[in-house]
Amino acid sequence: MPHELGYRRCPRASRWILGAILAWALRRPPPEHLLAMKIVAQRGKRDMDDIVLLARGLRVSRAEDLYNITIDAYGEDVVEHVHGGLDDLTLSCVAIEKRLAQDG
């Protein structure tokens, strides 16, 4: 059947597109990867609040564990050369550990 814009609808293509959208929406990274992404992004309070929730959900509170989760997700080479370096990651993880300890 012609569409008002002049092209024909293709039910098979529409079903494929809908299936692809649903499959994409239903896939999500594991919580460790979400935590690592938030740690690397560090966009202020909003990310810190998410980091605290994710870390608590994973029962992670030590800077060393946060560091290892991030390295496992990204790899040392990527963190060192793209995301501010391993020293920045270490400082971020220590700050997160302090925040987790403060919030109890």
Image: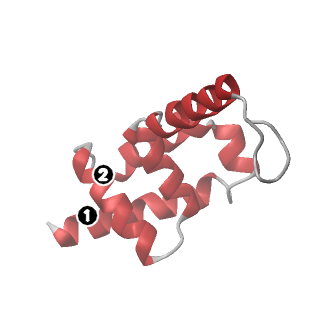
Determine whether 92 is above or below 54 in the image.
below
On the image, the x and y values in percent for residue 99 come to: 29, 69
Determine whether 51 is above or below 1 in the image.
below
Categorize mark 1 by other alpha carbons within 10 Å: few (<14), some (14-19), many (20+): many
Please indicate whether residue 45 sits to the left or right of residue 53 in the image.
right
Please indicate whether residue 100 sits to the left or right of residue 12 in the image.
left
Res 97 → quadrant: bottom left
Secondary structure beneath label 1: helix
Rendered residue at 57%/61% (across/down): 41
Where's the N terminus, which quadrant? top right
| Disc 1 versus disc 2: nearer the observer | 2
Please indicate whether residue 72 sits to the left or right of residue 13 in the image.
left
On the image, the x and y values in percent for residue 81 come to: 76, 49
Is 26 or 20 nearer to us in this picture?
20
On the image, the x and y values in percent for residue 22 come to: 50, 35
Q: Amino acid at mark 2?
A: Ala
Where's the C terminus, which quadrant? bottom left
Mark 1 or mark 2, earlier in chain: 2
Please indicate whether residue 38 sits to the left or right of residue 66 in the image.
right
Rendered residue at 32%/52% (across/down): 54
Residue designated by label 2:
55
Secondary structure beneath label 2: helix
Residue designated by label 1:
100
Res 47 → quadrant: bottom left
